[in-house]
Image (tube, rainbow, N blue to C red):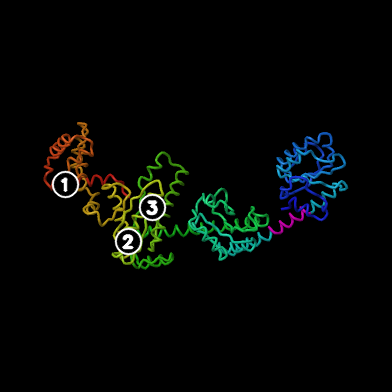
Amino acid sequence: MFTVRDMLDMPVFWDFRIIAGEKGEGREVTTVSVMDAPDIYEWMKGGEFLITSAYVMREHPEETENLIVRLVEHGASAFGIKFSRFIDHLPERALEKANELNFPIISIPVEFAFTDVINPVLQEIVDAQASVLRYTELLHHVFTESVLQDRSVPDILEMLETFIPGAAVLADIKFQRIYCTKKGEELRKSLEGLSLDEHMEKELEGRETFCLRNSGEKYGCLIFEQREDEKSPLLEYRKIAVEQAAIVLILKIQKMLSNAQIEAKYREEFVQDLIYSNIKSREEIHNRAGIYRWDFTEGGVAVLVDVDDFKQKYAEGFDRQTNESMEREMSRVMRISRNILRDSGYQISYSKLNDRVVFLVSVPGWRKETPRFREILERLREEIKKTMDFTVTIGVGRYREDILQISESFREARTAVSISRTMQPKDRVCWYEELGIYKLLSLVRDSREAEEFETSYVRKLQEYDRKNHMELWNTAVTLVNCDWNLKQASEKLYIHYNSMKYRYRKICEILGEDLKDSDSRLNLQIAVSLYQMREISPL
């Protein structure tokens, strides 16, 4: 960048001097124009060093103050005036305005012809631009080579550091990482705890940064070591280097994203082959697992993280934007779950299944590790509840020493989620091995016999309710859930205790059962459970 100060430092202009607005000597000069009309600013494009003999100002020098304001508004870099020919000086108010706006007013010796000013300045500007172009071409070649050689992100940062003073690190939003070189290690440490998201720049206020964007999409930020010798914005050559590096880094991240998406696709297909029992050979499992550096020799357990009421949240409308929003939310659920499980030291593999994520977790020494694993899953559930706009129900199958049986663990995790929602409120961790009789019911709930048994109780009560505008079926369900405590059930239904006793007698009458009898109670409880399990959509 060629500035007013650079121009005044040219030997040919040794006797030019600033008479006002000296603080603006850092303004960039891109061309030289001659003022031949009082409204010259109407034709200016910015960056002009405007020179004049003051002929057009001679009759109304008091209007110079307004002229200075207009020149600044239209981007002029400085105003050069030949004194002693048409005017001897500027009004004091004009000089004060130039100082106020940091707009340099330069006194040009009267013996200088305009060409004596224009030619040297333009030559210097052209030389500076040519130098910038040569430097840009050099950097373009260097960084393009790094793309062709598929250099790593730290390698690209190291190349950038050879062209700029100080260290640089990359805060990557896409992969949630901070990259650095050895030179930038201290800078990286100072950024620990930085939120790697769209709003990270707010946390970086006061630091020198450069945002990586492409077509409106943000990839991350380059963050630079603060240097005592330069607290101003990026200088021109430094900026060129950073911009060239940013282009290459965006290309690198895009390639990494593409590779990650391809790998994720094949990885998820492998996990789905495992959980749906599409692989019949242990040898095939271990060979494919080796591609992703997974070791299933210790077996594993299926953990299903299922978002509660996820589709209902978006039920009002479904379009491309809604779909993208759902994808982002599920990606966050997967990322939170993955990070907590992985940080706990377990080997994990995973796959998204619409509004669920299944994890296959290998836990050596399962029996000994189970209490710790329980704590980790509870922490996972709490973290999602704290950071997201919804909760999750987590189903856990039984541990399988033989990875070939992991599909059974997945089926159990799926069943645990389904049954959990019939028994308890959402937002909980449900273990299949703790389901008790519900494990047995889950095996027969879709049979014709189970349906007949269920409807023999349900239909009688529901048909009576329809004909008589009663709520006996709901009362029966509440009684079962309150462990046959009539007082507690009446409170839950907000009815009088005497009304509860009447309904209880009516239920016994309609069903032809004495619900004081343990077998009769068990039969109704099983019918209620089968009904509730059937109401839950199969996973």
Give neighbour class at mark 3: few <14, some 14-19, many 20+ (Cα, 10 Å): some
Q: Are marks 1 and 3 in contact (CB under 8 Å)?
A: no
Taking the image as shown, residue 240 lies to the left or right of residue 49, namely: left
Residue 125 % position (x, y): 76, 52
Residue under pointer 2: 372
Q: Give the distance between the C-alpha atoms of the residues marked 2 and 3, in whole angstroms.
A: 16 Å
Which mark lies nearer to you, 1 or 2?
Answer: 2
* Helix, strand or loop at mark 1: helix
Between disc 2 and disc 3, whose residue precedes?
2
Residue reaching furthest top?
Answer: 468
Q: Is residue 400 above or below residue 438?
A: below
Mark 3: amino acid: Glu
Query: Residue 81 location in percent, x, y?
Result: 81, 43
10 Å crowding of disc 1: few (<14), some (14-19), many (20+)? some
List the residue tagged with mark 3: 383
x, y percent for residue 15: 83, 51
Residue under the point 56% across and 54% down: 221
Foreground disc of the pair 1, 3: 3
CA separation in Å, label 1 and label 2: 38 Å
Q: Which residues are magenta?
A: 124-136
Q: Earlier in the sequence, mark 1 or mark 2?
A: 2
Amino acid type assigned to the residue bearing label 1 in the image: Asn
Query: In the picture, residue 376 is in which quadrant?
Result: bottom left
SS class, disc 3: helix
Q: Which residue in the protein does label 1 denote?
A: 523
Q: Position of residue 213 (x, y in %)?
A: 57, 51
Q: Secondary structure at mark 2?
A: helix
Q: Is residue 407 above or below residue 68?
A: below
Quadrant position of residue 477:
top left
- What kind of residue is marked 2? Arg
Specify the label residue 260 is tagged with. none
